[in-house]
Amino acid sequence: MSDNKAKSKETSAAKENEPKKIGDEPIIVFDNVTKVYTLYKNSREQFCALFYNSKKFKRHKALDGVSFKINQGESVAIIGRNGAGKSTVLKMITGVAFPTSGEVYVNGRVSALLELTAGFSADMTGRENIRFKCYVLGLKDNEIDEIEKKAIEFAELGEYIDQPVRTYSSGMRVRLGFAININTNPDILVIDEALSVGDSNFKKKCKAKINELIKRNITVLYVSHNKDIQDFCDRCIYLQKGKVIFDGTMKETLEKYPEFCK
C-alpha cells in the first residue's frame, strides 16, 4: 500500500516538472489583417455623418497587414510603443473589434484582463456580478457555481461580496474583476497591463495564478511595458505603427529591444 502511495507521489511530481506541451494546431491566426478607424473631430460631426456624406474626418490605419499564428499553450508577449496597434490586436481577439480586411481566427473561450471592472452593475452585489458575468459568457449553472466559489475565495472581499459594488473601493473592484476573469476556465487568457494595479500581495497572488494557468497549457497573451513579460512569456511579437517588426523568442527580444523590458 505504501509502495503504491510512493509511486503515486513520484508520478505526480514528474508530471509537475514536465515541460508544458505546445499544440500543433494554431488557436489564434491573424492573416494579413488591416484595421482602419474613421476619426471625427467631435461627436456632432460623427452624428451628422450618419445622414450625409461628410468629408470632415481622418482615417487612421491601426493595423497594416498583420500576420501571425499562436498555438495552444504558447505564452506570448505583445510589445510596442503607444499607438503601435497592441490594443487593436487584443480587441480583435476578444471580439470587440473586427478587421477592415484580412482574416482573424480564434478557437476557444477567451478571458480578457483588460478593463477589469468593465461591465459591472453598481447596484448588484459582488456575488451577483460574478454570476452575471458567467451568464454573459454562456456558462452553465454547474460551472457558474464552481467559478463563484473560486472567485469569492480569490478576491478575499469578506462580507463585502454581498454588498453593492457601488460601495467598493477601486482596489476592491479590481480584485473582483481579476477574480472573475481568471477563474472562468479560459482557453485563451488576454492580459493588458492588468498587473499594474493593486497592492503588492495581490499582485503576487495574481502572478502565481497566471503561472498556474500557463502550466495547464492555457494560451496567454500579455501586453506590458515592463519586465513582467519575462516572468510569463517565451515568445514576443513587436508591433510598430501597426506592423509586425519582430516575432521571436523572449531571449532574442531582450537582446534586440532591451528598452521594452526595463
Image (cartoon, rainbow, N blue to C red):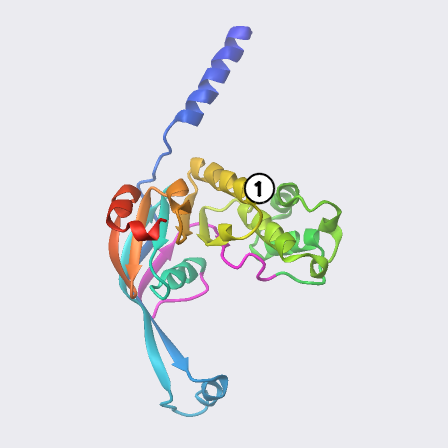
Q: From this view, report whether residue 150 is shown above or below residue 83.
A: above
Residue at image position (55%, 40%) is 205
Does the magenta run of residues contain 147?
no
Q: From this view, report whether residue 103 is shown above or below residue 188.
A: below
Nearer to the camera, 176 or 110: 176
Residue at image position (45%, 58%) is 94
Q: Position of residue 140 (x, y in %)?
A: 60, 48
Q: Position of residue 222 (x, y in %)?
A: 41, 50
Q: Is residue 219 visible?
A: yes
Q: Is residue 28 visible?
A: no
Q: Amino acid at mark 1?
A: Asn
Q: Position of residue 41 (x, y in %)?
A: 43, 84
* Quadrant (top left/top right/bottom left/bottom right) for the N terminus: top right
Residue at image position (36%, 30%) is 19
The reply, left or right, for residue 236 in relation to residue 47 is left
Instruction: Classify mark 1: helix, strand or loop.
Output: helix
Q: Position of residue 96 (x, y in %)?
A: 46, 64
Residue at image position (30%, 41%) is 24
- Residue numbers of the magenta segment: 95-119
Residue reaching furthest to the bottom: 52
- Mark 1 — residue? 201
